[in-house]
Image (cartoon, coloured by chain):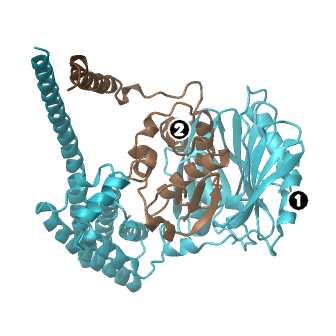
């Protein structure tokens, strides 16, 4: 009797287990199909956009009207950017097609650069035509490579969903490896790997855009001469931090950092207040204080934005940055972050920026970021403006209210600087900043001022 | 032969395991991503992106020193500006296998976002303790060997930062 009962129970349990397993499997397959669809979508989007971009680049080369050229280049810009986006979301385990990604970004950015140039009424130079033609050729080669992968995709030797899975634990993995030695056969993504390797060898592309290769090698211009020793860096860091907090710090640890600005990076402890630490970076070259972050949480505010601005201004003055002009400000948590720009005569130098963060509970300086300042600051020969402020004001469309005009040096993508008139305008309760080149009268850039809680941002 | 009572033990145990597994599965489905905890009481500027970035920082570097948290936020923003990566914060964060915490779902489980939110705000305001890093990883964990070919800039806490 009991034996029978146990048999029934056991078979019931087995059936349950099988049923549960099948149900789980069905669930897994549904998810796998959804993932597969996502991978296929990204792959075919990539393929289509690459082909379209190649066609648009060809059209812009074949067209003889600058306006049509600009239209086709704008299409190529969007198509190549969409291709880059699709590529980045494609699951490619174990390697990242960074060179393919960079190629697509640059092709997109270069098309945008040329389109903008044509829109300004200028023409493509023969070198630029040549450059565009070789980018188009490379785009065609990429399309051909992707077609080859497409063959594998339709032949089901590439399944995007198969790349997701949990790795076998190491013991069964070694046993399985012994039992079934893996033959060296081409992996499903070899096509991608080879394409990426070939694109790594492309010559560098230099132009006035944010992804130009020359920007990779940008060096800080404003640090001054001479290397400082670690002891000197620590001394400067302590002086600066003691002034910022009106307290007394000691060094806890020092490491070095080898980024765009090589620094000694220090962690400081407050001798008076427990658990207050500062992270501060001193440049090796010139020994400048590049960045400071006080990590303490800030309590309920007792100061307003105007009082914080005064604190920040006084601190800048004391640290040897006189005459800096506050440009915009934002409040995050109980901190006010104020961005200052340097000034030369009546020209604001937007590239030379310093950010100061003030704690609104006691007015302590809790943050400092002079990275943009030290990257850009150098002695400049500013040209004399050829336009008068009135002429710049006259460039604004009628019907848009002008609120003010001032001279400003602005950074443009590609690392150039232009002397402009900054014209503040108002349209439908929104403020805009329009930058009119002070030498040519061209409009260089428009920014929108966005109100955020406790401050303003430009975009 | 085993005594009768013990013979019954095995199927009963098996049934109990199955039942509890089914119940656990049911329970898990009950708390699908609908129940994402949001940060309470922290006023944020551009809240949508900031929230996402704070969540990633908390999941990737929740127990790292503060500057290490800002650094992780800065890596995301450096990627947004880099031609090698997507051009939006969400695009960068949800790239396949870009971040371990997205792959294993930890990003949806973090609850303490206080410090991570401050770090995200500092990163969005321009602070970058790495000066241009695009990658970071924990050298104590298993990582793709490809990553070691990148140019290492510095180490903050347990994370190595590279370009």
- Name the residue: 47% across, 27% down: B37
User: Dot 2: few (<14), some (14–19), or many (≥20) neighbours within 10 Å?
Assistant: few
- Quadrant (top left, top right, bottom left, bottom right) of the N terminus of chain B: top left
Q: Where's residue B22, x and y in %?
A: 26, 25
Give the residue pinned by disc 1: A235
Q: Quadrant of residue A64?
A: bottom left
Q: Where's residue A30, x and y in %?
A: 18, 39
- Name the residue: 59% across, 24% down: B41
Q: Which chain is brown?
A: B
SS class, disc 2: loop
Chain A pictured colour: cyan
In the displayed structure image, the side of residue A60 where residue B122 appears, left or right: right
> In this orientation, which residue lies closer to the viewer: A17 or A54?
A17
- Quadrant (top left, top right, bottom left, bottom right) of the C terminus of chain B: bottom right
Give the residue pinned by disc 2: B46
User: Dot 1: few (<14), some (14–19), or many (≥20) neighbours within 10 Å?
Assistant: few
- Name the residue: 48% across, 40% down: B52
């Amino acid at each position: 009797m009991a034996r029978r009962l146990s048999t029934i129970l056991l078979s019931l349990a087995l059936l349950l287990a099988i049923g549960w397993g099948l149900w789980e499997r069905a669930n897994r397959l549904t998810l796998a199909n959804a993932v597969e669809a996502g991978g296929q979508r990204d792959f075919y989007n990539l393929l289509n956009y690459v082909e379209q971009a190649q066609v648009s680049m060809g059209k812009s080369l074949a067209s003889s009207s600058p306006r049509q050229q600009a239209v086709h280049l704008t299409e190529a810009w969007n198509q190549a950017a969409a291709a880059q986006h699709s590529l980045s979301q494609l699951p490619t385990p174990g390697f990242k097609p960074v060179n393919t990604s960079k190629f697509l970004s640059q092709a997109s950015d270069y098309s945008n650069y040329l389109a903008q140039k044509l829109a300004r009424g200028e023409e493509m130079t023969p070198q630029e035509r040549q450059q565009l033609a070789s980018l188009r050729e490379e785009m065609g080669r990429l399309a051909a490579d992707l077609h080859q992968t497409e063959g594998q995709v339709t032949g089901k030797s590439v399944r995007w969903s198969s790349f997701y899975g949990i790795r076998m634990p190491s013991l069964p993995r070694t046993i399985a490896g012994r039992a079934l030695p893996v033959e060296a056969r081409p992996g499903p993504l070899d096509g991608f790997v080879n394409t990426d390797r070939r694109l790594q060898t492309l010559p560098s592309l230099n132009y006035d855009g944010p992804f130009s290769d020359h920007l990779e090698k940008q060096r800080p211009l404003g640090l001054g001469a001479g290397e400082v020793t670690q002891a000197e860096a620590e001394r400067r860091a302590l002086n600066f931090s003691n002034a910022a907090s009106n307290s007394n710090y000691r060094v806890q640890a020092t490491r070095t950092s080898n980024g765009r600005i090589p620094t000694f990076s220090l962690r400081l402890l407050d001798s008076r207040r427990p658990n207050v630490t500062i992270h501060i970076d001193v440049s090796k070259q010139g020994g400048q204080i590049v960045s400071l972050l006080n990590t303490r949480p800030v309590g309920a505010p007792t100061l307003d934005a105007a009082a914080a601005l005064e604190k920040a201004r006084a601190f800048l003055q004391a640290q040897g940055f006189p005459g800096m002009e506050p440009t915009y400000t934002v409040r995050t948590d109980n901190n006010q972050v104020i961005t200052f720009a340097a000034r030369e005569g009546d020209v604001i130098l937007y590239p030379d920026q310093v950010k100061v963060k003030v704690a609104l509970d006691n007015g302590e300086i809790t943050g400092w970021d002079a990275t943009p300042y030290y990257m850009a600051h150098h002695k400049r020969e500013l040209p004399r403006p050829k336009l008068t402020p009135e002429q710049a004001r006259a460039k604004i469309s009628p019907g848009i209210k002008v609120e003010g005009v001032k001279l400003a040096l602005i950074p443009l993508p590609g690392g150039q600087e232009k002397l402009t008139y900054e014209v503040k305008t108002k349209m439908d309760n929104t403020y805009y900043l329009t930058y009119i080149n002070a030498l040519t009268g061209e409009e260089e850039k428009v920014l929108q001022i966005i109100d955020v809680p406790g401050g303003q941002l430009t975009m | 032969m085993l005594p009768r009572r013990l013979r019954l033990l095995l199927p009963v145990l098996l049934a109990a395991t199955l039942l509890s597994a089914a119940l656990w599965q049911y329970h898990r489905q009950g708390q699908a991503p609908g129940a994402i905890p949001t940060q309470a009481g922290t006023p944020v500027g551009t809240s949508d992106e900031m929230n996402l970035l704070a969540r990633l920082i908390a999941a990737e570097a929740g127990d790292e020193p503060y500057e290490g948290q800002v650094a992780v936020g800065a890596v995301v923003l450096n990627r947004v500006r880099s031609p090698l990566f997507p051009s939006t914060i969400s695009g960068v964060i949800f790239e396949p296998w870009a971040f371990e915490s997205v792959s294993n779902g930890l990003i949806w489980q973090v609850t303490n976002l206080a410090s991570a939110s401050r770090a995200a705000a500092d990163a969005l305001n321009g602070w970058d303790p790495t000066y241009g890093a695009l990658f970071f990883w924990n050298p104590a964990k298993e990582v793709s060997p490809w990553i070691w070919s990148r140019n290492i800039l510095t180490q903050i806490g347990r994370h190595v930062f590279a370009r």
